Amino acid sequence: MTDQAAPSGELTLRTLAMPGDANAAGDIFGGWVMAQMDLSAGIRAAEVAHGRVVTMAVKEMVFQLPVKIGDTLCVYTRLERIGRSSITLNIEAWAQRYLTATMEKVTDATFVMVALDAEGRPSAVERR
């Protein structure tokens, strides 16, 4: 079991772990999980910034449990901080185990996103 009984934050992305995302043992590649977390961070940060964002940093990520073929990966985002041009989010990845209601935390990390203007330069985050 994991250190947390329930996800923290807003459900931002749900996707199915498929055989093409796995190694020969049926474990989903960590890079695939991280990519889903990055997509989620981008979705949430773009909503906050009301525009284009890019990933600036990902702070420590430790995989606590594997994701298996058939699991539904559920990614939750929680806004931690809004700076002048940056948005810091805590991202949690949870596996809903195949054909069950069991949810287990796989990993989490802090993602720092930066808002960009039309020319690709950092821009102030609009606060609405």
Image: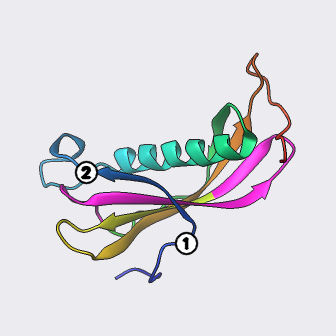
Residue farthest toward the left in the current orientation of the protein? 24
Where disc 2 sits, the SS reads: loop
Distance from Cα at disc 1 to Cα at disc 2: 21 Å
Could you tell me which residue is drawn at 18 percent across and 55 percent down? 69
Residue bearing the label numbered 1: 8
Residue 65 image position (x, y, % from top left): 33, 68
- Asked if 30 appears above or below 126 in the picture, the reply is below
Q: Earlier in the sequence, mark 1 or mark 2?
A: 1
In the image: residue 7, left or right of residue 83 = left
Residue 55 image position (x, y, % from top left): 62, 39
Residue 92 image position (x, y, % from top left): 50, 63
Q: Amino acid at mark 2?
A: Ala
Q: Residues within 10 Å of mark 1 (few under 14, many from 20)?
A: some
Residue farthest toward the front in the current orientation of the protein? 128
Residue bearing the label numbered 2: 17
For the magenta stretch, what is the residue range? 66-89
User: For residue 8, what is the image quadrant?
Assistant: bottom right
Q: Amino acid at mark 1?
A: Ser
Where disc 1 sits, the SS reads: loop
What type of secondary structure mainly makes up the magenta span? strand
Could you tell me which residue is drawn at 78 percent across and 24 percent down? 117
